[in-house]
Each structure stands twice: as structure tokens, then as C-alpha cells.
Amino acid sequence: DDNMDEEEKQHIMEDIEGLRQYAHFHLHPEEHVVTTDVTACERNYFSRPSAPEQETREEAEEHYRILQDAAMIEENVQRQRYNRSLEHDYFHSKTEEMSASSPVCVKSVMKF
């Protein structure tokens, strides 16, 4: 009976060691894999020819800054268009509005 317990304990300890190694492999993917099997081969997902190009942290930060600048420029352009439209409406208040859509009713607040 003690012999059975020792065998079961040994089997459990082997399972624990295998799980510990498995967890270590996933927690440290940067470490090289050591094997004695001559038929083992690898394929690195990140350095294969068809892999998407990886950005460095600096490139990603620069890309983010460029996108922020582009959004700010677009916002300024929209604001300028809106201001020009208001300016035009203010200085050309006597011009009649034209509409290509179905009938539109407009009430003029200015007396001419």
C-alpha cells in the first residue's frame, strides 16, 4: 500500500513539474527553447517573411502624434469653414437663400 502511495506521489510530482515548465514557457516567451531532439524545428511567427511589419515603441508614439496632429488640423479646418460661413451670412444678409430641395419656408427677421 505504501508502494502505491509513493508511485502516485511520484506521478503527481511529475505532473506538477510539467505544469511548472509549461507555465514558465508561456510567461517567458523570449527565452530560447532547449531540446535534444534533432528532428525538432521551429517557425517564428514574428520574423517569418509573411509576418506584418512590427513597429517599435518610438514609431508607434510618432504615429500616434501624427494622427493627433491630423485630427487637430481637421478640426481647425472645420472651424474655419464654419466661421467663414457665419461671416458670409453676416455680411451678405440681403442675399436670398436658394434651395434645390422641396418647398422651404423662411421667415425673414430683417426688414428691408
Image (cartoon, helix red, strand yellow):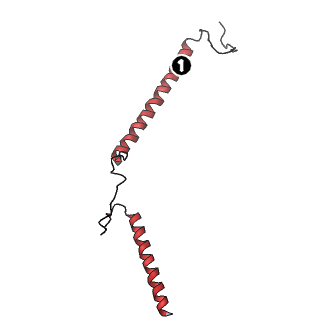
- Does 98 appear above or below 63? above
Q: Return the x and y of residue 24 as percentages of the image width and height.
A: 39, 68
Main SS of the magenta part reads loop
Towards the viewer: 28 or 70: 28
Residue 18, quarter of the rendered image:
bottom left
- With 94 as the anchor, is 41 left or right in this view? left
- With 74 as the anchor, is 59 left or right in this view? left
Tell which residue pokes out farthest to the top in this image. 112
The residue that mark 1 highlights is 85
User: Does residue 59 belong to the magenta stretch?
Assistant: no
Q: Residue at x 50, y 19 (%)?
A: 84
Name the residue type under label 1.
Ser
- Does 13 appear above or below 81? below
User: Does residue 40 belong to the magenta stretch?
Assistant: yes
Q: Which residues are magenta?
A: 28-41
Towards the viewer: 11 or 83: 11
Towards the viewer: 39 or 25: 39
- With 66 as the anchor, is 98 left or right in this view? right
Q: Residue at x 31, y 68 (%)?
A: 37
